[in-house]
Image (cartoon, rainbow, N blue to C red):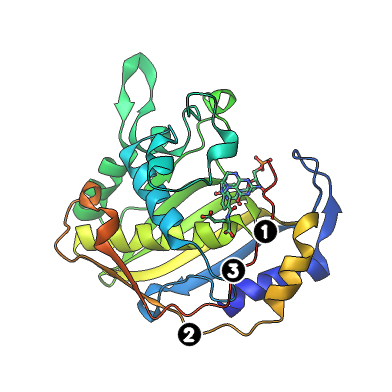
């Protein structure tokens, strides 16, 4: 994960200071790309301990099409608590757009089912896209989608995925986002009978919050360790059939965690 540390350093050196919606202030750059060959290990940051359990449950929650935090809190995951209303609702965020994008005349599009069918039927398609960015619905969402759109690509029997993230909290959110989409690529590859290719992460406004500078310096003083390995239960052939127990992480030996406040 040296390239993740390079991104932190790049922002510190080349970023400009900007105000932001949360009132915290950031140092930010516009445009950057990270790439991971998923056959070479699972891209989970090693220079601090990352809470993989939250990442897995959040991804399973997106795939269910769920947008209420109850499933997360029932499983000990609190990362969305600050944005939910008193009933736990977030409005039509990721899960709703992925699984039930509402079109004209009540037509409902399940983008996950559709994209998997298309990967199997027409792997050379250049339209293998899932979008959470539904402008008509954004006013009803607790937070506009940050990981806005992703595309699959098949070549030589390998499945790659590229994410476009319009806004990225590089210390807290990005380690979660990298691991989550790397995992999604592995899961879709398995259910489509493909090997894994590259995970490509493309950023818009990628920023370090002003109250994360100390934590970033601490991380930059650490030398990345070897990447861990992620094993999926090979029996699962349906993207909606995965449970938490179907994921096994091996050889993850990170440095201790580093606490940081989240900007709301
Ligand atoms: N400012 C901001 N940054 C984000 O990364 C972010 C948002 N807002 N809003 C929506 C979601 C929620 N996400 C979050 C929220 C909190 C943590 C966080 O506090 N992580 C800690 C604790 C991990 C845990 O409890 O599982 C960490 O050390 O990584 C991470 C991602 C990602 N998103
Ligand atoms: O998955 C996520 C979700 C959110 N973020 C960060 C990016 C920004 O710091 C905030 C969102 O604020 P906006 O004003 O809507 O851009 O949350 C993330 O990094 N990853």
Give percent across and percent down for residue 126: 37, 53
- Residue highlighted by disc 3: 257
**Residues at circles 1 and 2 in contact by the CB criterion of under 8 Å:** no
Can you say whether 97 is above or below 49 in the image?
above
Q: Secondary structure at mark 2?
A: loop
User: Which of the two discs, 2 and 3, labels the residue nearer the N terminus?
Assistant: 2
- Residue where numbered disc 2 is placed: 226
Residue 202 in the image, given as x and y percentages of width and height: 57, 59
Asked which secondary structure carries label 3, the reply is loop
For ligand 1, tell me if the residue under mark 3 lies within 8 Å.
Answer: yes
The residue sitting at the left extreme is 235
Q: Which residue does the numbered mark 1 point to in the structure image?
A: 31
Foreground tag (1 vs 2): 2
Position of the N terminus by quadrant: bottom right
Q: Residue sitting at 36 percent across and 57 percent down?
A: 184
Badge 1 density bin: few <14, some 14–19, many ≥20, Cα 10 Å: few
């Amino acid at each position: 994960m040296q390239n993740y540390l390079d991104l932190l350093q790049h922002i510190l050196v080349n970023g400009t200071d900007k105000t932001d919606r949360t009132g915290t202030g950031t140092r930010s750059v516009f445009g950057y790309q990270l790439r991971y060959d998923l056959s070479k290990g699972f891209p989970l940051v090693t220079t601090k301990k990352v809470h993989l359990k939250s990442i897995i449950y959040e991804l399973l929650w997106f795939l269910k099409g769920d947008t209420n935090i109850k499933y997360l809190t029932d499983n000990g995951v609190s990362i969305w608590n600050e944005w939910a209303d008193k009933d736990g609702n977030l409005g039509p965020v990721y899960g709703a757009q992925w699984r039930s994008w509402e079109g004209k005349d009540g037509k409902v599009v399940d983008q996950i089912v559709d994209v998997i069918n298309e990967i199997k039927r027409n792997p050379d398609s250049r339209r293998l896209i899932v979008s959470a960015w539904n402008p008509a619905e954004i006013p009803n969402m607790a937070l506009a989608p940050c990981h806005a759109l992703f595309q699959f690509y098949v070549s030589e029997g390998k499945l790659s995925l590229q994410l476009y993230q319009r806004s990225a909290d590089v210390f807290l959110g990005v380690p979660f986002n990298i691991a989550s989409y790397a995992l999604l690529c592995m899961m879709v590859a398995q259910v489509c009978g493909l090997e894994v290719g590259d995970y490509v992460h493309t950023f818009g406004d990628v920023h370090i919050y002003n109250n994360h500078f100390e934590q970033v310096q601490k991380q930059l003083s650490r030398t990345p360790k070897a990447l861990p390995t992620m094993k999926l239960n090979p029996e699962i052939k349906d993207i909606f059939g995965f449970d938490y127990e179907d994921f096994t992480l091996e050889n993850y030996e990170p440095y201790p965690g580093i606490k940081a406040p989240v900007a709301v």
